[in-house]
Amino acid sequence: MPKNCNFIEKLREVGLRPTKQRLKMCEVLYNREKTFHFTINDLVKLLSEKMNQKISLATVYNTVHAFEKKGYLKEISIDSHKSYFDTNTSAHHHFFDEDTHELIDCDESDIDKINIRKNIAGKKINSVEVLVRVASDNQTQK
Amino acid sequence: MPKNCNFIEKLREVGLRPTKQRLKMCEVLYNREKTFHFTINDLVKLLSEKMNQKISLATVYNTVHAFEKKGYLKEISIDSHKSYFDTNTSAHHHFFDEDTHELIDCDESDIDKINIRKNIAGKKINSVEVLVRVASDNQTQK
DNA sequence: ATCTACATTATAATAATTCTAAACTATTGA
DNA sequence: TCAATAGTTTAGAATTATTATAATGTAGAT
């Protein structure tokens, strides 16, 4: 498991002070095998339940947004009622399970490269993202 | 210009009563050449300013959602802070101009067909949507 | 014309997010 | 080591978007 000093350095590098709260958040977010997708709500729950660390809501918002601005987190738009964040900040696509409301990362190999034929005058492409919505296939058969 | 009786019929067909408010909304939404992208806020403004029709906010929400449920409108997720709706309900992709916050429809021909290689067990694909974020190209040059 | 089910409305309620101002703390450098 | 200070956290208030409520109104069937 990565030690906290990694997080301290990481935070320092981008100019964020390594406070107790930010370190706890780093642990929750980045001390894991797989990419983590979450809403602010999920995160607050995890922090208070699992980490036994009560962090003010405002701090969670501030810190998540600080992380986002610094490129530690990426916001994903799926549902206009909820903000999802992703610890995988590289360009990648998603599946969204409409039954469970779960986000799943796509690998490079899951979706062929997207070819954009249209050009918008004076504009450059910042990102190309695909969202594949899936749901349980009820007519189970042949 | 399409006459209102078209809207009356249209509404009847899907089981919505053609009330004064819904007809006004139909006019704003569908009496236009091009696809219309809007937020609830945009729509309320248009109704009150251009159409001189004061409709209660609750009615606008209810009616937009009724239209959406019946397939007259499609919700587009771009920004978790705003709900965008689209009068083009067919499957299509979008450009999103991050400078102006404007949505632009893609034609079939603008983006090659997306090939999804991954399968999620027991799940079927409901939709595949591409969002291309663009912004002004400032390093104007060679 | 009357009835009934659905609509509209103003307003209250809720939920998500941001603001505020005071208290706190990590860093700097004397 | 110890202030000074600049950035941070916090509780709670404020704001914004959306939904619920309950009274009143209206379209469509009889």
Image (cartoon, coloured by chain):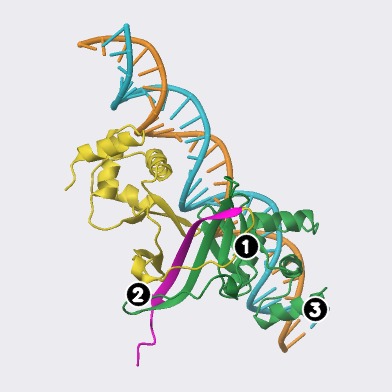
Chain colours: A yellow, B green, C cyan, D orange
Compared to residue A71, the image places residue D7 above or below, namely above
| Disc 3 target residue | B5
| Disc 2 target residue | B118
Q: Is residue B6 visible?
A: yes
Amino acid on which the number 3 mark rests in the picture = Cys
Q: Is residue B98 visible?
A: no
In terms of image quadrants, where is residue C7? bottom right
Q: Nearer the viewer, residue C11 or A103?
A: A103
Label 2 in the same subunit as label 3: yes
For residue A59, the mark is: none
For residue B104, the mark is: 1
Q: Is B142 within the magenta? A: no
Under tag 2, what secondary structure?
loop
Q: Which residues are magenta?
A: A123-142
Distance (Cα) linking label 1 and label 2: 28 Å
Crowding at mark 2 (Cα within 10 Å: few <14, some 14-19, many 20+): few
Q: Residue at x 39, y 87 (%)?
A: A139
Amino acid on which the number 2 mark rests in the picture = Lys
Q: Is residue B42 left or right of residue A98?
A: right
State if disc 3 and disc 2 touch (CB < 8 Å).
no
Image coords of residue A108 (percent x, y) = 35, 66
Image coords of residue B66 (percent x, y) = 61, 70
Q: Nearer the viewer, residue A69 or B27?
A: A69
Q: Residue at x 41, y 73 (%)?
A: A134
